[in-house]
Amino acid sequence: MKIISWNVNSVRARVNNIKDYIKLAKPDILLLQEIKTQNENFPFEEFSKIGYESYVNGQKSYNGVAIISKIEIKNIEKNFINDNFKQSRIITAELKLKKKEIELINIYVPNGNPVDTEKYEYKKDWLKKFISNIKKKIQRKSNILIAGDFNIIPEEIDVHDFKRYENDALGRLEIRKKYRELINLGFRDVYRFKNKTKQEYTFWDYFAGSWQKNYGMRIDHFLISNNLIENIKSININKKPRSKEKPSDHTPIELEII
C-alpha cells in the first residue's frame, strides 16, 4: 500500500500538478495539507474522475487538510483536538492493512512564526493538545500512522543551515522537544529510521533561489507506531514535483507499507 503526504499550498491552484503526480505515483492514499479552500469549493470531481474519493476538512483561504483515497477508509473525523482558533488542521480515518486496523492522522501543524507572539503560543498549545490526545489514543489503539506538515525541523541534519533556525518557530529547542515527546510515546520517524545520516529536504522557500541552491528543510514527516515497523517497505522524498511549473514549496513523501 502506498500512502503519500504532500503540502500542496492550494489545491485549486495546483490541481493539474496534483493529478499529473497521481497518475505517475499511483498512491492508494494521498494526504494533502494547506489546501486553502472551503469544503464546497474543493475539486472533488477532478479526483473522482481518476478514481479517488475525497474527504475534506477545509477553511477559506488558509490551512485545510484532505484525504484522497482509492481504497476504502472509514470513520472520518475532523475534531481530534479542540483548536482554540478553530483552524482546519487535522483529519483522521481508519484503514485496514491485512488484518491490522490502522488509525491514519493527517496534520498541518501551525507554523508559529514570529516567535514571542500569539502565533507561537498557539503552536505550542496546539502541539500540547495533540500530544495529549495521541497519548490517550495509543493506549486504546496500537496501530497509528501520523503524517503531514509538522512545521518542525527535528535535528540539525534536517536543514541546510541550522544556525539560521535556532530561534525560529520551526527549529527552537522547545519545539523540537515536542517532536521528541511525541515520538517517545511509541513512534518512529520513518524517514530517519530508514536513513540514519542522509540529508534530504521536503520544503524549499520560493525566495532567494532556495530550490536552485538546495537551501531546504525536512519538516514533513511520517511517524509510525512501533508495532507497525515490520510493515514498512520503503520511504522516499520525491523532489520532482518541486521542479515543475507553478509548484508547491513542499514536495511529496512516499511511504510504502505491506
Image: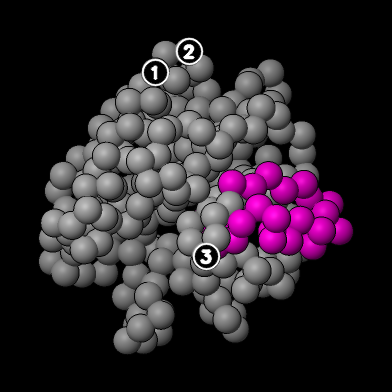
- Residue 255: % across, % down: 56, 46
Left/right of residue 13 with respect to residue 199 in the rendered view:
right
- For residue 226: magenta? no
Amino acid type, mark 3: Ser
The residue beneath circle 3 is 61
Left or right: where does residue 130 sit relative to residue 145? left
State yes or no: discs 2 and 1 in contact (Cβ < 8 Å).
yes
- Binning the other alpha carbons within 10 Å of mark 3 as few (below 14), some (14 to 19) or many (20 upward) gives few
Residue 43: x and y, percent? Answer: 73, 61
Q: Are marks 3 and 2 in contact (CB under 8 Å)?
A: no
**Quarter of image, res 158:** bottom left
Q: Is residue 128 above or below residue 220?
A: above
- Amino acid type shown at disc 2: Arg
Q: Are marks 3 and 1 in contact (CB under 8 Å)?
A: no
Residue name at image x 52 percent, y 23 percent? 143
Amino acid residing under circle 1: Lys
Tell me the element at label 1: helix
Magenta stretch: give its range.
29-57
Q: Position of residue 188 (x, y in %)?
A: 39, 35
Please provide percent x and percent y for residue 144.
50, 28
Residues at marks 3 and 1, CA–CA distance in whole angstroms: 32 Å
Q: Quadrant of the N terminus?
A: top right
Name the disc covering residue 140, or none. Answer: 2
Going from N to C along the chain, the mark reached first, 3 or 1, is 3
- Return the residue at label 1: 136
> Image height check: is 246 above or below 31?
below
For label 3, the SS is: loop
Q: Is residue 108 left or right of residue 49?
A: left
C-alpha span from label 3 to label 2: 36 Å
